[in-house]
Image: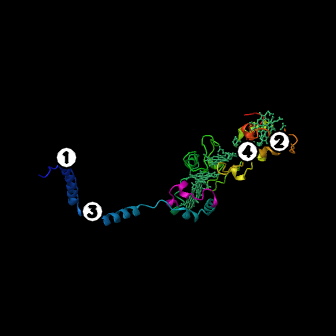
Amino acid sequence: MPKKVPEQIIRLGIVISIIFGSVALTLYLLPPALKDKPFHRRSTILAETAKPIQFAGSNACADCHDDKYQQKKTGYHRNLSCETCHGPAAEHAADPITIKPFVARERRGCPTCHEYDPSRPTGFPQINPTIHNPLQPCVTCHNPHDPVPPRTPEECAACHAGIVRTKAISSHALVACTTCHTVPEKHKITPRIIRPTKPETRDFCGKCHAKGAPVVDAPKIDLSTHWEKYVCWQCHYPHLPAERL
Ligand code: HEC
Ligand code: HEC
Ligand code: HEC
Ligand code: HEC
Ligand code: HEC
Ligand code: HEC
Ligand code: HEC
Ligand code: HEC
């Protein structure tokens, strides 16, 4: 005797045929115009192209604002379009005297891209707008069309104030930072990407502190017996060497 089909399979079959049936019925009832794919593509394109063009593109601005165009071309903002900051300006390009584009002179505009945000790529110039030279508009100090990196800080103290203050009262006060660290000029512009060197061996400190080293003022130790298994800065903080760790 053939086995009986289970009841739940029959119910499932009924539900599926109702779904397929109603889809087929809906397709059958729809007017043909609504099912004409090429017609839909055509009309969408027509509707989009009928909209007024709002952006003119940076090259269009060059015709009348060649000075700004040339300034921006080689600067840090070279990859920004004029209309990123000035808004859509096609109408202005067509009728420059009566229609003026938007000019963001206040501080609000620039932090859209430059406010500190940890998700931005390393090295992207970021600031904290509440403490970075507050109250004045950004454009009093930075030219928006050629934001040259402002003067690079001369002194290590601009960024390593704590270390500089500590060393200034230590017995290494007269040993310059650059005696122990070779600092590429670019470290002051992109400090996290271009890094200075740090001493790596005991012999480095030995240049002044080993017995017989020519620096008279530096107290001497015997490199071969003075805790020879360790590097010096495991015990002496180099920026405050009298303090033993
Ligand atoms: C056909 C010439 C022409 C074109 C093209 C043109 N401009 Fe202008 N633009 C002018 C003139 C003229 C002025 C008015 C100068 C004035 O009033 O002193 C002006 C003024 C401006 C101003 C200053 C507005 C203000 O309130 O001070 C901005 C910003 C500006 N244009 C941006 C643009 C941008 C961006 C483009 C490209 C999308 C562009 N312009 C294209 C001629 C042009
Ligand atoms: C990073 C944003 C930014 C970009 C990109 C930018 N501008 Fe500007 N632009 C400004 C700001 C901000 C001012 C107002 C400057 C001021 O008041 O000192 C300004 C001022 C102007 C002015 C008025 C001139 C004046 O001295 O008052 C013109 C014209 C102008 N921009 C054209 C352009 C053109 C053309 C481009 C593209 C080649 C461009 N800008 C790209 C932000 C930008
Ligand atoms: C649409 C995003 C955007 C806006 C808005 C913008 N910038 Fe920039 N800015 C950039 C980019 C991108 C760079 C180049 C970064 C690089 O080279 O890594 C840059 C670079 C800079 C630098 C160079 C920093 C350095 O030392 O490397 C300064 C300063 C600067 N912008 C100031 C401004 C000011 C002021 C404004 C407002 C008038 C402004 N930016 C608006 C995207 C923007
Ligand atoms: C009073 C002048 C002044 C004003 C106003 C000012 N800046 Fe600066 N900005 C500087 C100087 C100077 C530096 C160089 C670094 C330093 O010494 O702090 C700098 C550095 C920068 C840098 C580079 C930071 C880096 O890490 O490379 C950016 C980006 C920047 N400023 C954006 C802005 C923005 C955006 C505003 C407005 C919200 C603004 N600045 C307002 C003077 C100014
Ligand atoms: C514009 C700010 C700035 C200036 C100016 C600057 N530094 Fe730095 N320096 C930094 C930053 C930021 C770091 C990275 C700190 C971190 O990642 O913890 C750093 C790291 C270092 C390091 C550690 C490198 C490493 O791999 O651990 C040394 C050493 C150093 N700086 C020495 C100097 C000396 C010496 C000077 C002066 C000649 C100087 N720096 C000037 C910002 C600066
Ligand atoms: C006598 C040599 C010497 C001098 C002078 C010196 N450093 Fe260092 N510095 C070192 C050594 C060694 C280390 C590595 C310490 C470690 O790895 O624990 C170091 C580490 C650093 C670091 C990494 C962070 C830290 O605290 O360990 C920075 C930043 C730094 N030095 C900045 C400076 C600055 C700025 C000056 C000048 C004010 C300076 N150093 C002067 C020897 C020196
Ligand atoms: C350019 C020479 C020079 C170099 C390199 C140097 N020092 Fe010195 N150091 C001195 C001088 C000079 C003094 C003593 C200054 C004084 O007492 O007037 C000194 C003092 C010290 C003292 C004694 C501190 C005290 O007051 O008791 C220690 C510890 C010391 N250095 C450790 C180090 C270590 C660790 C290094 C390597 C990271 C190092 N030094 C690299 C020149 C140097
Ligand atoms: C394990 C820890 C340790 C290490 C590593 C170490 N020191 Fe010392 N250092 C000391 C102690 C503790 C003293 C003080 C007692 C003494 O004089 O032995 C001292 C004293 C000194 C003095 C002062 C001597 C005087 O006459 O005033 C100098 C200079 C010195 N160390 C340099 C170095 C140098 C350079 C290195 C690396 C080659 C180094 N130390 C490695 C622990 C250490």
Q: Is residue 178 placed above or below 60 in the rendered structure?
A: above
Please give the name of the residue rendered at 70% of the width and 52% of the height, measured from the top-left corner.
186
Q: Secondary structure at mark 1?
A: helix
For disc 3, the marked residue is 35
Q: Are marks 2 and 3 in contact (CB under 8 Å)?
A: no
Please give the name of the residue rendered at 46% of the width and 61% of the height, measured from the top-left corner.
53
Q: Is residue 172 visible?
A: no
- Place of residue 145 in the rendered image (x, y in percent of width and height, measured from the top left): 62, 56
Q: Nearer the viewer, mark 4 or mark 1?
A: 1
Q: For marks 4 and 3, give the CA distance.
A: 71 Å
Please give the name of the residue rendered at 39% of the width and 61% of the height, measured from the top-left corner.
48
Q: Secondary structure at mark 2?
A: helix
Q: Is mark 4 within 8 Å of ligand 5?
A: yes
Give whichever of discs 2 and 4 has the lower sequence position: 4
Give whichever of discs 4 and 1 has the lower sequence position: 1
- Place of residue 12 in the rendered image (x, y in percent of width and height, measured from the top left): 21, 49
For disc 2, the marked residue is 209
Q: Is residue 42 left or right of residue 62?
A: left
Along the line of sight, the residue nearer the viewer: 105 or 99: 105
For disc 4, the marked residue is 156
Q: Nearer the viewer, mark 3 or mark 1?
A: 1
- Place of residue 209 in the rendered image (x, y in percent of width and height, measured from the top left): 82, 41
For disc 1, the marked residue is 8
Q: Is mark 2 within 8 Å of ligand 8?
A: yes
Give whichever of discs 3 and 1 has the lower sequence position: 1
